[in-house]
Amino acid sequence: MSESQASLLLRKQLKDLSRNPVDGFSAGLVDDSNVFEWNVTIIGPPDTLYEGGYFNAIMSFPNNYPNSPPSVRFTSEMWHPNVYPDGRVCISILHAPGDDPNGYELASERWSPVHTVETILLSIISMLSSPNDESPANIDAAKEWRETKEEFKRKVSRIVRRSQEVL
Amino acid sequence: MDSEDDMQDAWGGESDGEFYDSNEEEDDEGSSDKEEADYGFDDFAADDGAPSSRMPQANYTILSEKDIRQRQEEAIATITNFLSVSKTDAGILLRHFKWSVSKVNDEWFADEESVRRSVGLVRPTRPEYQRRSRGRGQEMRCTICFETHSFSSISRMKAEPACGHFFCDVCWTGYIHTAINDGPGCLTLRCADPSCGAAIGEDMVLSLVCTDDRTKYNRYLLRSYVEDNRKAKWCPAPGCEYAVLGFVPGVGASYDIVCKCSFNFCWNCLEEAHRPVDCGTVKKWIRKNSAESENMNWILANSKPCPKCKRPIEKNQGCMHITCTPPCKFEFCWLCLGAWTDHGERTGGFYACNRYEAAKQEGVYDEADRRRDMAKNSLERYTHYYERWATNESSRAKAHTDLQQMQAVQIEKLSDKQCQPVSQLKFVTEAWLQIVECRRVLKWTYAYGYYLPDQEDAKKQFFEYLQGEAEAGLERLHQCAEKDLHVFLDGEPGQATFNDFRTKLAGLTSVTRTYFENLVRALENGLTDVVQGPLRRS
Amino acid sequence: MGGEPDGAGATAGGEASVGGAAEGPKTVHVRCSNGNKFSLEVDLSITVRALKVMLAERSEIPADQQRLIYKGRVLKDDNSLDSYGLQHDHTVHLVRGAPASATTPASSATTPTSTPAPGGGGGLPQTPPGLSQTAPGSNPTGLGAFSFPNFGAGAGGGGGGFGMGLQEIQQVQQQLMQNPNLMREMMNMPAVQNLMNNPDLMRSIIMSNPQMRDIIDRNPDLAHILNDPGTLRQTLDAARNPELMREMMRNTDRAMSNIEASPEGFNMLRRMYETVQEPLLNAATMGTEGGGDLAGNPFAALLGGQNLAQTPGQQIPSINLSNSTNSATGTPNAGAAAAAPNTAPLPNPWNPTPTPGVTGAGAGAAPGPNQPGATPLTGAGLTGLRGSAGLGGLAGLGLPEFGAGGGPFGVDPAMMQQMLQNPAIVQMMQGLLQNPQYINQVMNMQPHLRSLLNGNPQFREMMQSPDFIRQISSPESLQQMLQVQQAVLSQLQGRQQAGGTPGQPGATPGANAGLPDLSSLLSMFGGLGSTLPTNNTEVNAIPPEQLYEAQLSQLQDMGFYDTQENIRALAATGGNVHAAVERLLRNPG
């Protein structure tokens, strides 16, 4: 029951996004037969270091969505303190509350069934503009961001450039 | 206040006899309570009258599941009455404040709003209105699955969160189900709406989920009483369902608890009871063991060859006195493989084999060349202590088994054979209990000895002396209990012999007990009796 | 499911199927990155490129800079819309992308799209997106090619003694062009590399020229390019490697023709040309007025040259002058050749040009038609650029600056001062100067100097002694020399303008410029306390009337009417009026 609920919900969100897309990203399915794997392109938000870049990511939804969060993984090259070197995104709303009951007081920081593809991607976009170096996934990037920001900016510009070339 | 309540409970004695008077021999070990129900000795019940003299040592309660539930109910009822909140809310509050009724009261009356906010208790005002004002047939949209539901279907929900966020039951169920599967975090489940932190109470949970989940949830509720409560702990023995509540260290500052399952453990570190060494030492030792145990296991796993006939010997009894099988029948000490007759002054006293230095000087270790070759200095030393520790541990385990076997089978047998009433034979059991306990203490004294700083020679010597005395006594006792008893079990000696045996055994028991008390006391004092000075046998 | 206020899209399926089944144009919504939204009626079988073209007008983003994103994928130009599953009433995102070039910086907002003129090689690194497939590196290379010779020459000029006039510089350039080894050597000198790598320096050099500044102000992209050391390096690499340069040239040409071929392209070219060329022209004209300023303003030179040439071939270089900066509007200058597509064969980059100053090296400067009748400066300019504005000009600018006071008359003294104070430059010059071989080479290239040296071994020795060079290269002395030059130059110019050139046969201003410099240099030697004899003969060769015109007039005002005497006195005192007066008074008659 829950699986069909999940797929129904995902299809609905897909339709909505095709109709009324949101600025900042574009989402579609990797393969039309599998509604649980989404392929999204995130546009580097303006006024950030990532401005102008086009980053692809894959979102994998579990069968019991929306009760469990999806996992997001960047397929384009990404350099950000909260993105693991293999591309996995590590942000608080993608963690189910059961994982760490002491971690966060606010439920708003954790996964909730209310979240949709849109809210997730918007969170990711806001993560791009303001990295959180408290719990870094990519230690090198976090260190660089904290210590030698210039070098960080340069690296980011490089990946932004490269992402544009792929287009 | 809370502890007082518990204490009164303890004093009053629960109907199912949560704690019993300790046995006499256990008394000095510090663990004051131990159940002996299975023994069926009436005398024990009679001893209930004298717990007060031993209470100050430590006081705690052993709780079974039923007791836990009962206490929970009581606490909730109290809070409900005091604060005029629902039962569910009371439960939430108590869990938040660690099941301390007093704390709940204090905080609540200090600042109710902030408590409500932090806990997630929302005043159910508006939603009530909304619910009433909305007629039937109106539609609501669940923001999780984006389906619309008619209001009537929602109101059929058995419970709603007080915050008024409506989701369809399917979504709620799923949400709660996932949370329950994720673990005890489900007890602090909050409203699915990210901005709303309203707590989800058990009434709603229980009404929505399937049976399995309900069981799980209830289990979590129960466990929360122990886990959240700072004063309660589960008994660490595997398979033991009891919890210990309300431990207050007594005068003796011993942390040993005895559970109903007869498992002794230390309150602090939840390890096996380790008097006389302290928790820190125990931790270190255990860690060291696990690291080096590979080596040790290798060493110890190799059974030892008989010094005389070189046949591999596997120790199958707790006592160190090994007699090789016929035709060899050579008697030797397991630990040093030296002839048993030789054990005397050289190795630190008859029946004792604990002197490290002496043994070394004796060249006893020449026989254990391979051990010396393998080990470096520290490892040698460690080997020495660890070996004894492990051996004593196994002895103890064996003794424990023997004890149980004894209790189960042999007493009857013996009683039949000797035509004595079972009650007369309790000295045997006492002896075994003593052995078990002494083995434990002895084992930990080796750990103690390992961590004794090398420089303090005097202390070391004193320690080893005491240890030797104790060990000697224990060996004698153990041997007597093992060997001699078999004689009586199997053979057909007369009554007089049996009485002698009884006297001897009882005597040994008390002597050993004395030795061990001395030892423990001295060690616990940190061997402060010793003044660093010229070497002298005290 | 009716009655849902939010239209949860439950009916989407219905619509989609309807849309899919229907024939004819479908509505496609487009949502821009700046928030604009509009709709188009298109047939879903058209290609993405066609759609982009349609969108170019509505969205003001040129088709080549458009990026369409649908369902998380970027739509490629060659595919059709329905191959991506685009359906009726769906929305695609439109964002501005960088012109497809490997070297462009990431600022999507500002990078101009599809600018033609990949900066003809030397031009700014940005290549037009549409065309750039062929010329990814062409721009910088070309740029490098041009700037390099200028640099080289400048460096050579600088090293060789500051007295070199423009002519010498050009000659140096020629030499450099013809002797790639020398160029390479020079390139490899750390001093030069340091300089190249110093964006600040480059920027200051460029900015010091007001015309350039203007141009840059109008075309911020130029600034970007100029500020990018990577570009410079690429440029220089290209210069170092003639192969590269040739390749770049070719690419540029191809690109140019492509641009012209495409419907919008030519207009764009035109627009660009006007945007950039105009200021350049202005700069040029100012330059020509300044006379000696030409050296300092290769733009001027180039454009001056360009204006003379009217062939379409010329147009290209001139257009290439503009960087691939924005597309302003306007029609190409010099109506000639504007409208007609370029049918002339692309200029042969390696054509040696007849005129002395003009070298064909890498420049691919306009062939013959390049009227050098224009001053040799044109050549200089052209050599510098094959229509590459930006750095070419920069190079030209830099060049004279390098000359560190040599040559660049008309270069702002202030700027020179500034340059001199720039430790990087000083360092570089010192480095240059300390390489005796290099100095020799450079000097040999100067006919004047050569003759000078040949005639005077002592002088040569002097030039070669490191101490001397160090002295010379010290900032103070440089400044002094600069001042002297300024004085001389103004003198000269005054003379020229006044037309009062006392018939110096064959002495082109350049030559004159050269000689006075030399003389001033020599006089400076005297000032430095060198024991080497100053070459009075040389000094005397310079028409003293010209040299000391101002002083003479002063003396005459004071009452010393004997010109010859005055001249002698002035010569003896190195142009110092007071001393001359003393002398005159001391030696009556």
Image: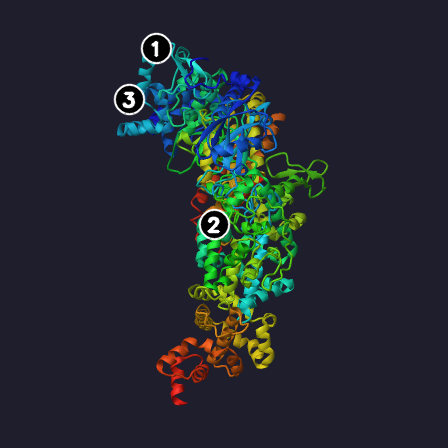
Q: How is the image coloured?
A: rainbow
Q: Are marks 2 and 1 on the same chain?
A: no
For label 1, the residue is: B135
Residue A150: image tag: 2
Q: Amino acid at mark 1?
A: Gly
In front: label 3 or label 2: 2
Q: CA distance from mark 3 to mark 1?
A: 36 Å
- Local secondary structure at mark 1: loop
Residue B68: in sight, yes or no? Answer: yes
Q: Amino acid at mark 3?
A: Phe
Chain ID of residue with mark 1: B
Q: Are marks 3 and 2 on the same chain?
A: no
Residue B82: image tag: 3
**C124 relative position to B27: left or right:** right
Chain ID of residue with mark 3: B
Quarter of the picture containing the N terminus of chain B is top left
